[in-house]
Image: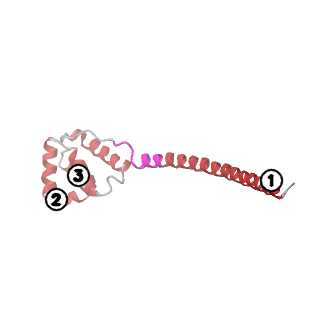
Amino acid sequence: MDSAEVQVRTAVTQQGILLDQHATQETVTSRDVDLLTTQVAELSVRLQELQLAQNPTPTVPPTYDGDPNSCRAFLSQCFLVFALQPRRYATDESQVAFVITLLKGRAHDWATAVWDASAPFCATFLEFRAEMILLDLG
């Protein structure tokens, strides 16, 4: 064998070794990509679960018109909404405002007047609730 032939054989052998290394690396990379794809899919599912847990489908109580027989049930429904969506109704002000948006008729007229007047019992939901019950709006 002459020198040129030896060089060609050596070059081909080296190319074969490099191709094997590339194939091995491609296999490893492919497995890594598959693993990452699986992890991303699992994280996406978990994120959706967490979002649903933090933002459940909002339930809105029916409007309340001041009927004393349904006041406590209405207010209990509002309290449940706050419990199910604590981030959305994190402040007493947001809770009282939410309740007022569900009022109609004389109950709405009363609540709007006391809200506009910044009545002290509008500061917390529990005080507002107590005042509604006390005034027999319900």
Q: Is residue 103 left or right of residue 73?
A: left
Say which residue label 3 marks: 97
**Is residue 79 shown in magenta?**
no
> Residue 83, how many percent across, how many down?
37, 50
Residue 10 figure quarter: bottom right
For the residues marked 2 and 1, what is the alpha-carbon distance in whole angstroms? 95 Å
* Residue 124 or residue 9, whichever sits in front: 9
Q: Amino acid at mark 3?
A: Ala
Q: Which element type, helix, strand or loop, lies under badge 3?
A: helix
Q: Nearer the viewer, residue 59 or 10?
A: 10
Q: Quadrant of residue 138?
A: top left
- Residue 35: x %, y % from top left: 61, 49
* In-image side of 11 versus 135 (left or right): right
Label 1 crowd (10 A; few <14 / some 14-19 / many >=20): few
Residue ID at (23%, 54%)? 128
**Marks 2 and 3, the one that precedes in the sequence:** 3
| Coordinates of residue 56 in the picture (x, y in percent) | 39, 45
Q: Residue at 24% across / 53% down in the picture?
A: 96
Q: Amino acid at mark 1?
A: Arg
Q: Are marks 1 and 3 in contact (CB under 8 Å)?
A: no
Residue assigned mark 1? 9
Q: Is residue 50 magenta?
A: yes
Residue 112 falls left or right of residue 1: left
Residue at 13 percent across and 43 percent down: it is 106
| SS at badge 1 | helix
Question: In the rendered structure, which segment of residues is drawn in magenta?
Answer: 47-58
Residue 101 image offset from top left, x and y in percent: 21, 46
Q: Which residue is mark 2?
A: 119
2 or 1: tag closer to the N-terminus = 1
User: Could you tell me which secondary element the residue under label 2 belongs to?
Assistant: loop
Residue type pointed to by label 2: Ala
